Amino acid sequence: AMKQNKYDDAHFFAAYETMPRSVKGLEAASEWHVLKEMLPDLHQKSVLDLGCGFGWHCRYALEQGASSVTGVDISENMLQKARELTNDAPITYVRMPIEDIDFAGVSFDVVISSLAFHYIEPFQTVCEKVYACLKPGGSFLFSVEHPIFTARSEQDWHTDEDGNRLHWPVDLYQHEGMRE
């Protein structure tokens, strides 16, 4: 199966760069406040971030005292932006599809992935690869986009004529299977 990389599409990336999470980072990411509470102590830990995007979680891990951080992303656009925003030697950015990770002989204390796993398949294989590079007793923490956001092709609020949000339509929410 073709690995999805819409972030190297110039138009998509230009729009993504203007999103609040792209500009303001973790504090503007709605899931961050919950994810942060679930993270283990990162002090002196080796951390792997799968689907690292602009590197926000990588830099956060370093701020929390991580000894080394590796960020993996399929998108060269994402990694270029991550490198621009990062000036810390202990962070290594690697261009690679999540499905292709193979850290033979390397192990991590913590593996995180925020809002990336809904782009990949098969899920079981990725979990096996994460398990293979996780130290015994290590932590694996990930979030995925809720299917409510992809129930319709137009992923947006319904608004009134003044632009006020009325509701988020959920037609076709219970339709199972692949979503484009």
Image (cartoon, rainbow, N blue to C red):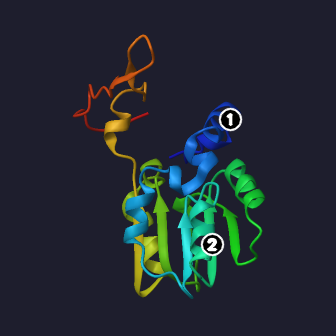
**Residue 143's spot in the image, x, y percent?**
40, 58
Q: Please state which amino acid type lies under the numbered disc 2.
A: Thr
Q: CA distance from mark 2 to mark 1?
A: 25 Å
Q: Is residue 80 left or right of residue 178?
A: right
Q: Are marks 2 and 1 in contact (CB under 8 Å)?
A: no
Q: Is residue 136 visible?
A: yes
Q: Which residue is mark 2?
A: 70
Quadrant where the image shows the C terminus: top left
Q: Which residue is mark 1?
A: 14
- Between disc 2 and disc 1, whose residue precedes? 1
**Residue 111's spot in the image, x, y percent?**
48, 73
Residue sitting at x 58%, y 77%: 103
Q: Please state which amino acid type lies under the numbered disc 1.
A: Ala
Q: Nearer the viewer, residue 88 or 139?
A: 88
Q: Residues within 10 Å of mark 2 (few under 14, many from 20)?
A: some
Q: Nearer the viewer, residue 70 or 106?
A: 70
Labelled disc at residue 126: none
**Which image quadrant for residue 72?**
bottom right
Q: Is residue 178 visible?
A: no
Q: Nearer the viewer, residue 116 or 5?
A: 116
Residue sitting at x 64%, y 55%: 54
Mark 2 lies on a secondary structure that is: strand
Residue sitting at x 73%, y 64%: 86
Mark 1 lies on a secondary structure that is: helix
133 over 30 or under it: above or below: below
Q: Residues within 10 Å of mark 1 (few under 14, many from 20)?
A: few
